[in-house]
Every structure is written in structure tokens, then in C-alpha cells.
């Protein structure tokens, strides 16, 4: 079995990179188009116009097949040669799919550090109700990932914290994949490099996350914040694709079936999934305490109530558990027996410990 690693061609992180977007895009094509999420549309439009090039298109807010088709038609009609996605994970995923369909390079510019989507060759597609509908792999990874640390520091700290939840899961899920002997996300055998990156993502989050949140609240670009941004976006993305995902992301996907969870960030639901995964694997008290302590300290959910499910019914949770255990689910990358009953038991255990931790 082959060993595989997947990377964007370039990763650039620093202050003031927004102004360099046209310059970077110009290295990959002469007819650029940027798909931009609110509230950066006017800023990017002005930057693009100052450089006398490019089309700026507004992202509607959800990465659906309809939105992808809409943007694709515009880009194809304008004969775009290089594409950019600017915004949160959904805008970036939409840009990646459109560029992939066109067969042109894509420049990814996250405005929040809430997921590892920027560095991956993968996109999550949602339906109109915000439920995960599909995962689409791209033929090529992003040509460039540009992370302006000043923009990230100016965003609400909740987004950074959500990204910590996503990155926290990377090492735990990779460890499960190793124990199970699972293939990587793209197929093939796990590498020591990929595993080291995945574990490092989680380690940095646990070590620097609390300080990084405080710095972000103050709008300060500090060493702690820079490390966490790197872990949220780069290390988590490389680690996940070079290893795989397991319980945490499977729980997230199942939770999207419940409309009550829609207001909550991807990484917030993934963080609760990390806790469920630990209970599923009968983790020791030291490991559980470490994760619960961290999540509570930074404001990540540790109970069902904190993801909108205070009054959730047994029928709803059974629906979630059934979805988590559907055929080809990533939950089967866990090295333990999997069944809807086992998943439900772990969900209740995670919620029970969270409630006791809060008290």
C-alpha cells in the first residue's frame, strides 16, 4: 500500500497579506475572479479595482450544489484563469470546487481560523437546510493559502475557538486511525510525517489555546495566536488529510441533522464529538480531564445543552446515532466496536461528564 501526503503548493501567514491578493493571483493567471464572503466584499472589490483587474463575486453563505453551479457559470462565461476564495470555510470550499471544475489554480484566503478547510483538497457540500450532503475531493490542492493574521485577530474570538475544536480533534482521530490500521483520507498508508503533524495540531491547541483566545479578544497578533492559527489552518488540514477522521467528525455530521444545532460552528460540534470519541474508547480519567478542562476554559461545548440540545428527544438522538453508524461512515475508523447503541451510550456519557464538570 502506498504512503501519501497532500499539501497546498504554498502556505503564507503574516500581517497585511490582504493587499497582496492581486499580486499573488497574477502569478497564476491573467483573468482573476474572487468569491468573497460578507463583510469583506467591498474591501476586496476595491483592492481588485486598484490593480485594474479581476471580477469580484459575492458568496451567498452556504456551500450548496446550487451556489457552486451559479458561481461556476459566471466564472466560465468570463473565461477566468485563476480563482480566489475569501472568507470562511464554506466560501473557501465553494471556491475550491468551482476552480476544480474549471481546471484552474485557486488561491485561498481565510478571514477566520474556524476550520482546517483552507489547506485541504476537500469540500463539504450542504443542502439548503444546512445538513451535510456530500464530501467532494478536488483533483488539485490550493495553489496558495494566504492567512492575514491581522484579519484573523480582528474577527470574533468565537471563530478562533471553533477552529481550536476542529484542530483538537486531529490528533485524537489520527491516533484512532493508527490503532485501527485505517487508510488515509485519500487512500494509502499513514506516514509518520502525517501522524506527527496531526498530533502536533492537538498539542499546540492544548498548550497555547487559552492564551490565544485572550489575545484574540484584545485584537493582538501574538506568538500564541500565530501558533494557534497555524495549528487551526495548516497543521490540522495537513494532519487530517494525511491521516483521516473518525468519531469527532462523524458525530458532527450526525448532529447537523438536528436543526437546533445549526447556529453552532463546525468546530464547536466537532469538539463535543472529541469528547464522545474519548468515551467511546474508554479513555482514562487523565485524558478526559485534560480535554474537558481545556474545552470549558476556552468556551467549547461540553454538554448537549451547549450545542442547542437541552430538550433533545431520544428519537432525535437515535436519528443522530443511526446516521453516525451508516455505511462508510468515518466512525468505523475507531478501533472499538461500533453500533448505534454504543454511540448513544457515549453521547450520554459525554453529556453527563460535561454537566458534572460545570458543577
Image (cartoon, rainbow, N blue to C red):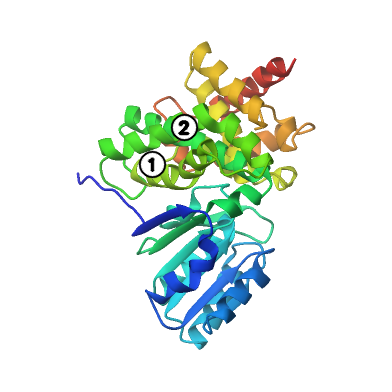
Residue 284 position within the rendered picture, expressed as x and y whole percent measured from the top left: 49, 13
Helix, strand or loop at mark 2: helix
Residue 218 position within the rendered picture, expressed as x and y whole percent measured from the top left: 68, 40
Left or right of 95, for residue 193: left
How many numbered discs? 2
Tag 1 residue: 239
Tag 2 residue: 204
Left or right of 239, for residue 307: right
What residue lies at 49% left-to-right and 34% top-to-bottom?
169
Helix, strand or loop at mark 1: helix
Q: Nearer the viewer, residue 261 or 108?
A: 108
Residue 54 position within the rendered picture, expressed as x and y whole percent measured from the top left: 53, 81
The single residue placed furthest to the top in the displayed view is 285
What residue lies at 50% left-to-right and 38% top-to-bottom?
223
Residue 353: name its quadrant. top right
Residue 306 position within the rendered picture, expressed as x and y whole percent measured from the top left: 73, 33
Q: Residues within 10 Å of mark 1 (few under 14, many from 20)?
A: many
Residue 12: name its quadrant. bottom left
Q: Nearer the viewer, residue 249 or 198?
A: 198
What residue lies at 44% left-to-right and 72% top-to-bottom?
23
Please give the label number shown on residue 169: none
Whether residue 136 can be seen here:
no
244 in relation to 276, above or below: below
Q: Nearer the viewer, residue 272 or 220?
A: 220
290 in relation to 124, above or below: above
Left or right of 68, for residue 261: right
Q: Are marks 1 and 2 in contact (CB under 8 Å)?
A: no
Residue 201: name its quadrant. top left
Choose the circle earlier in sequence order: 1 or 2: 2
Q: Residues within 10 Å of mark 2 (few under 14, many from 20)?
A: many
Amino acid at each position: 500500500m502506498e504512503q501519501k501526503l497532500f499539501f497546498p503548493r504554498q502556505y503564507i501567514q503574516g500581517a497585511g497579506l490582504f493587499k497582496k491578493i492581486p499580486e499573488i493571483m497574477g502569478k497564476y493567471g491573467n483573468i482573476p475572479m474572487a468569491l468573497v464572503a460578507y463583510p469583506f466584499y467591498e474591501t476586496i472589490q476595491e483592492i481588485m479595482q486598484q490593480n485594474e483587474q479581476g471580477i469580484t463575486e459575492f458568496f451567498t453563505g452556504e456551500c450548496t450544489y446550487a451556489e457552486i453551479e451559479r458561481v461556476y457559470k459566471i466564472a466560465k462565461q468570463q473565461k477566468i484563469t485563476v480563482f480566489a476564495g475569501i472568507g470562511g470555510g464554506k466560501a473557501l470550499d465553494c471556491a475550491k470546487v468551482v476552480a476544480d471544475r474549471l481546471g484552474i489554480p485557486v488561491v485561498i484566503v481565510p478571514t477566520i481560523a474556524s476550520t482546517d478547510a483552507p489547506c485541504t483538497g476537500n469540500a463539504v457540500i450542504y443542502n439548503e437546510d444546512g445538513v451535510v450532503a456530500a464530501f467532494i475531493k478536488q483533483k488539485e490542492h490550493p495553489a496558495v493559502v494566504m492567512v492575514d493574521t491581522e484579519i484573523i485577530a480582528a474577527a470574533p474570538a468565537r471563530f478562533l475557538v471553533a477552529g481550536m475544536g476542529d484542530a483538537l480533534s486531529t490528533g485524537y482521530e489520527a491516533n484512532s486511525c493508527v490503532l485501527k490500521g485505517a487508510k488515509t483520507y485519500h487512500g494509502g498508508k499513514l506516514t509518520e510525517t502525517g501522524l506527527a503533524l496531526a498530533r502536533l495540531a492537538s498539542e499546540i491547541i492544548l498548550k497555547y489555546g487559552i492564551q490565544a483566545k485572550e489575545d484574540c479578544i484584545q485584537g493582538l497578533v501574538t506568538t500564541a495566536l500565530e501558533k494557534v492559527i497555524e495549528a487551526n489552518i495548516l497543521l490540522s488540514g495537513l494532519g487530517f488529510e494525511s491521516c483521516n477522521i473518525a468519531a469527532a467528525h462523524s458525530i458532527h455530521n450526525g448532529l447537523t441533522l438536528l436543526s437546533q444545532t445549526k447556529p453552532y460552528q463546525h468546530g464547536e460540534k466537532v469538539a463535543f464529538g472529541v469528547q464522545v470519541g474519548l468515551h467511546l474508547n474508554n479513555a482514562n480519567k487523565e485524558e478526559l480531564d485534560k480535554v474537558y478542562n481545556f474545552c470549558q476554559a476556552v468556551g467549547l461545548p461540553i454538554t448537549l445543552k451547549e450545542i442547542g440540545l437541552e430538550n433533545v428527544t431520544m428519537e432525535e438522538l437515535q436519528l443522530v446515532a443511526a446516521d453516525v453508524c451508516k455505511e462508510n461512515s468515518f466512525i468505523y475508523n475507531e478501533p472499538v466496536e461500533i453500533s448505534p447503541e454504543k454511540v448513544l451510550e457515549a453521547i450520554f456519557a459525554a453529556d453527563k461528564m460535561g454537566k458534572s464538570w460545570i458543577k
